[in-house]
Amino acid sequence: MSTPPGYLTRTDRWLSLDLDDWTRRVLRRHFDPEHGSPYWLKRAAELPFDPLDVTSYTELSAFGPFPLTELRELDPADLVPLAVPRPLAGQVWETGGTTGAPCRVFYTEAMLAHNIDWRCRAMEVGGFEPGRSWLHAGPTGPHIIGTTTLALARDYAATVYGIDMDPRWVKRLIRAGDLKGAQSYTDHLLEQIADVLGKCEVDYLSTTPALFQVLHRRHPDLVGRLHGVRIGGTQVTPDMYREFSAAIEGKPLGLTYGNTLGSGMGLPPSGDGALLPYVPPYPQVTFAVVRKDDWTRSVDYGQVGRVRLTVLHEDLLLPNVLERDRAVRHATGDSWPCDAVANVEPLQITQASPEGLY
């Protein structure tokens, strides 16, 4: 069965766009006096410069780091330009809430379509065939990764089984020191996954790094039946990549990195998994790797720094989001119009801000 047409054409077109032109386009939309976004029109009056004087992507540093507390407190509709008809029809998505209340953003239909197109591109590039059966065992509900089932069923012609995972509950148990409870919840999820894989014809599995690591150690026979695995979460280490590759014996192993604000597609690893790079869904999302002591300056290629994320959707503007992750700055050469990040890992893991089953 062939892949449903359209998404490759659309993603190729986006990759051909000039980032400075796109930046100006997005700023004109959000700061339009009549049809801009309420949040940014209010912020414009407080800024020491005219946002419409910003002419290039690098000049977005003038906005400073975006305060994520805003995403925990404001009405998500205020970030959406008034050019989008009201009342808004769509879903509010949330981050995992690792360090407190979750951040919330509204996805318009155009944003959701963009997200799904990139997921489908990543699946085809990764060697996953359309028209197959999948099990998605991961967060759903308010988490954007839950759209995996929609992308697979609607746009990748797949039959999809689902296991829901509540990452916040696991993190709450870890914060409370209830490791027995966290293990019990993990067992609960694995029982459901094993039940589906043992009774149903499933070609591919989509899940998180932590869940897959436990699954293949406990049920290598079930993992051995799969024809490929897609891993999405906050980090996959080189050791984990080699372990996972061995577990599925050379079958497709796709990696993604990111969160509700923006997700990256894994490029082919190098050095037997020593380098695991990810590219953003350009130009709506871009990655930078910046110095710890100066978020406006990128580190040299091959060096480690903090991940800075910029969201440039026509319907959502979030400049200079400083992530809780660090990574290697990776050069993509002529293959991609912006930097990639590689070997992503949390800046710090503590009992107060655990990664849990991600």
Image: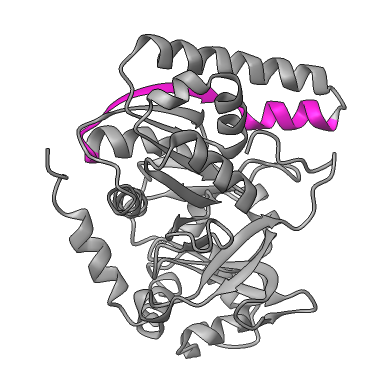
- Name the quarter where the C terminus is drawn: top right
Residue pictured at 30% horizontal, 54% vertical = 125
Residue pictured at 35% horizontal, 75% vertical = 335
Q: Is residue 223 above or below residue 118?
A: above
Place of residue 76 in the rendered image (x, y in percent of width and height, measured from the top left): 53, 50
- Describe residue 53's horizontal placement relative to residue 121 as left or right: right
Place of residue 35 in the rendered image (x, y in percent of width and height, measured from the top left): 37, 67
Label count reads 0
Q: Is residue 213 above or below residue 44?
A: above
Q: Nearer the viewer, residue 179 or 303?
A: 303
Residue pictured at 54% horizontal, 19% vertical = 219
Quadrant of residue 175 in the image? top right
Q: Is residue 85 above or below residue 54?
A: above
Place of residue 107 in the rendered image (x, y in percent of width and height, measured from the top left): 42, 49
Residue pictured at 46% horizontal, 88% vertical = 56
Q: Residue furthest right?
A: 177
Display coloring: one colour
- Name the quarter where the N terminus is drawn: top left
| Magenta-colored stretch includes residue 156 | yes
Q: Nearer the viewer, residue 21 or 63?
A: 21
Quadrant of residue 66 in the image? bottom right
Place of residue 216 in the rendered image (x, y in percent of width and height, measured from the top left): 55, 27
Q: Nearer the viewer, residue 40 or 280?
A: 280
- Describe residue 227's horizontal placement relative to residue 176 as left or right: left
Quadrant of residue 203 in the image? top left
| Magenta-colored stretch includes residue 304 | no
Q: Nearer the viewer, residue 350 or 202?
A: 202
Read off the magenta span.
155-175
